[in-house]
């Protein structure tokens, strides 16, 4: 048996348990994510962080064409000092945040899914004032994207159970 035949055989053997358990890719034709694609209307953004969050959710789930669900969310973040030198100068900050969300059916008005996503980002405070402000802004943008990705992942995981 040549090496390529062995690899193909082993790959087929490894995929056998997945086929037996009813595994379906989330974004495949019969996957749960198809229930969400283009069907989730995200609440209108108010702050810059909200805008980043909404844009990221819509980039992952698509802009709502025929919305069946409304996604309400609440973002919160706190800034904490990270690295401190012996002379009590902060050299690093951490931005901890969370997104609490609720998915509601437009037909029934019933909450069908919800939860909380948490995450953090950091940035260095050792540059100039302008560089520090830009780094903080970038950290907030990264945190919003991180939280949006977690919310979408949680929604896709529970999408099979949606009405």
Image (cartoon, grey):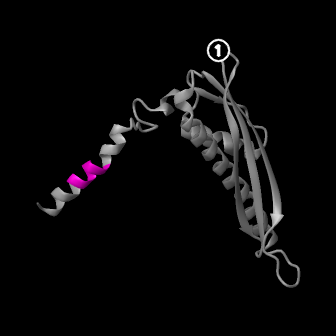
Q: Residue at x 12, y 62 (%)?
A: 2
Res 89 quadrant in image: bottom right
Q: Is residue 127 above or below residue 98?
A: below
Element class at badge 1 = loop
The reply to whether residue 118 is visible in this rendering is yes
Q: Which residues are magenta?
A: 9-14
Q: Nearer the viewer, residue 163 or 87?
A: 163
Q: What residue did someone put label 1 on?
A: 107
Res 28 quadrant in image: top left
Q: Position of residue 10 (x, y in %)?
A: 25, 55
Left or right: residue 74 compared with residue 146: right
Q: Is residue 109 above or below residue 77?
A: above
Q: Position of residue 116 (x, y in %)?
A: 71, 42
Q: Position of residue 81 (x, y in %)?
A: 82, 68
The overriding secondary structure of the stretch rendered in magenta is helix
Q: Tell me if residue 13 is in the magenta stretch.
A: yes
Furthest toward the right, the residue is 88
């Amino acid at each position: 048996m040549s090496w390529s035949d062995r690899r193909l055989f082993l790959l087929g053997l490894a995929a056998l348990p997945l086929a037996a358990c009813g595994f379906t890719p989330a974004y495949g034709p019969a996957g749960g994510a198809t229930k969400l694609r283009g069907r989730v209307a995200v609440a209108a953004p108010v702050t810059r962080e909200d805008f980043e969050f909404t844009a990221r959710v819509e980039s992952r789930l698509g802009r709502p064409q025929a919305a069946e669900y409304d996604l309400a969310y609440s973002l919160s973040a706190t800034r904490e000092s990270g690295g401190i030198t012996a002379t009590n100068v902060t050299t690093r900050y951490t931005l901890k945040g969370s997104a609490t969300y609720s998915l509601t059916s437009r037909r029934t008005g019933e909450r069908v899914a919800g939860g909380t996503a948490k995450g953090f980002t950091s940035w260095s405070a050792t540059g100039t004032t302008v560089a520090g402000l830009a780094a903080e802004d970038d950290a907030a943008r990264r945190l919003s994207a991180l939280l949006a990705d977690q919310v979408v992942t949680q929604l896709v995981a529970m999408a099979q159970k949606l009405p």
